[in-house]
Amino acid sequence: MFCIKAYQSSSYLDIKGIKVDGKAAKWELFPRVEALGSPLTISLAEPVDRDQEINIDISLSTTNDCTALQWLNAAQTSNRRQPYMFSQCQAIHARSVFPCQDTPDVKAPVDFNIRSPLPVLASGLPTGSRDYQPPKDTKTCGTLLYTFKQEVPIPSYLFAIASGDLACASIGPRSTVWTGPDELRGCQWELEADMENFLQAGEKIVYPYAWTTYNVLVLPASFPYGGMENPIYTFATPTIISKDRQNVDVIAHELSHSWSGNLVSNASWEHFWLNEGWTTYLERRIAAEVHDEPHFGFSAIIGWKALQDSIERYGEDHEFTRLVVDLKGKDPDDAFSSIPYEKGFVFLYHLDNLIGREKWDKFIPHYFTTYKYKSLDSYDFKATLLDFFSSDKEVSKKLQVLDWDKWFYAPGYPPKPKYDDTMAKKCYDLATRWQNMVSKPFEPKRSDIDNWFAQQSYVFLERVMNFDKPLRSEDVEKMGEEYGYASSANVEILFRYFAVGLKARCKSVYQPTSELLGKVGRMKFVRPLFRELEKCDRELAIRTFEQNREFYHPICRQMVEKDLFGDKK
Ligand code: BES
Ligand code: ZN
């Protein structure tokens, strides 16, 4: 028998009233605890049996402080014709849309009923749209009621909605892309060549796709992440639409979450590596299937660099450089970095090598079957792996002597694996020529990077960015022009090129950097560019932020504010 109170998380909600099984209930909103929000308790008139269902009906509205939703007026959208809204709930922002048990350890099926004058998407399968006659006393803003059904139980952070001037086109037999009508054809071209191949590769590695259709919504430029694995509709930044099909690995990543994260979830954000490490591992296995083995090594080398950057930024002893972190009293957004992705990947790749690919590949579907529709922590993962190989003496022995605690809790670097570096080598060699430019001058030519994948330019630029002695301004400009980096349509290139220029205090990139910061809101680009621009010209950095404050998503705005002005709130 359970009784008296139902606990929910909430954040900046305006609660109007609560009914339990049709009757008005007593409720109380407790004072806000920063980042976590305000606990809401609902008093139940009767004790409740375990597994007994009750109906809780909460009327509420969100407020201007809502951290999950961005509302764009027509002038803020790409075609300036219609307003737009979208959500981003991971990690703990769902509670600013509705009160909930906002932990990935709790899952539920969801029905969505959303009214809007514009097309709506939500993280369920669409079940239609129809006329809606609201009760007489309600204000209505819409003409249609859009309905979606998510029958697979999902954690609150996978709740997602978007509405705006949206059109759709096919990108595969079970996939569509959604975006503004003017951008539709470009988005279709970018994704249609790879989408079904990715799905089939994922299915080969794990097991059949469980969510019926896989679609992509390409959002306005203020979307703060590269991608978000909302079920049925992955939300993606428009910066993956680079007109060269070179950034679709983000989609392979989000698709991989259909197994790791969405079916099998981390039980808390302290075990986030189970979501992102596994997803990064699957993403790279998909790349090896769809392209070739060197792509696996190349992507892993890029990942190691991202890991290095994050560890250097926090410091090698920092709590957040552990695989399993302690988040008590902390905001998971502050702990976000490449570490769970890349240290998690290195751990799984280590297990793959230790156990041997053939046997390891049998464990993958076993793991994703055991925890399908469930959540787990790192200790469940360890127990499941040990149990699976318990009758294999050779593997068992290796797993017994593995220093699990060190992998889980040691801060700083894991042991560096060996990767196939055929693709990376060319990038390093060219970077060395630029490094020696002063003592051994050379005339850069476009042909230096002929037939390169864009990612090879990323690796090259990252090497240059980390030279002890930055380039001379005139060399930065020469590079930008000769290699076409300064005018690239690929934001991944522009971002790294501007970072090289800022490190070199090359004044001619300051203004273009400030302009780019008014056009993209993806935090991966925005935060490092602000950090570097601030070192060059703090006043310009602050002016740029103030001018674009409304353009940025609330999460991004909050993070940049912390980066530029410290944690004042
Ligand atoms: N689930 C993440 C995005 C996320 C993480 C949002 C934590 C909020 C809190 C998503 O799958 C992701 O990892 N996106 C990456 C893509 C990349 C690794 C290919 C991104 O946004 O850059
Ligand atoms: Zn991810």
Image (spheres, rainbow, N blue to C red):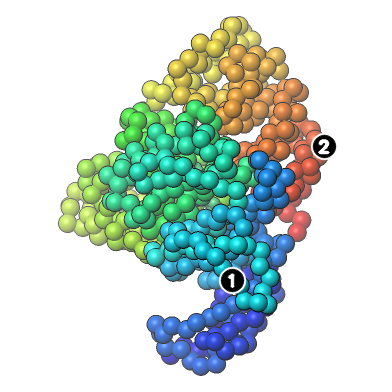
Q: Quadrant of the N terminus?
A: bottom left
Does residue 335 appear in this view? no
Q: Quadrant of the C terminus?
A: bottom right
Mark 2 falls on what kind of element? helix
Q: Judge whether 455 appears above or below 192 on screen.
A: above
- Left or right: residue 38 versus residue 447 is right
Q: Position of residue 45 (x, y in %)?
A: 55, 92
Q: Position of residue 376 (x, y in %)?
A: 39, 62
Q: Judge whether 240 appears above or below 156 on screen.
A: above
Q: Judge whether 513 appears above or below 329 on screen.
A: above
Q: Position of residue 181 (x, y in %)?
A: 57, 41
Q: Residue at x 60, y 13 (%)?
A: 482
Foreground residue among 10 and 20: 20
Q: Earlier in the sequence, mark 2 or mark 1?
A: 1
Determine the image quadrant of residue 38: bottom right
Q: Residue at x 58, y 10 (%)?
A: 444
Label 1 sits on what residue type? Gln
Q: Which mark is residue 539?
A: 2
Q: Nearer the viewer, mark 2 or mark 1?
A: 1
Q: Residue at x 64, y 22 (%)?
A: 486
Mark 1 falls on what kind of element? loop
Give the labeled residue for mark 1: 133
Distance of label 2 from label 1 (alpha carbons): 53 Å
Does residue 544 appear in this view? yes
Label 2 sits on what residue type? Glu
Q: Position of residue 66 (x, y in %)?
A: 67, 62
Determine the image quadrant of residue 27: bottom right
Q: Which mark is residue 381?
A: none
Foreground residue among 221 and 189: 189
- Left or right: residue 435 versus residue 418 is right
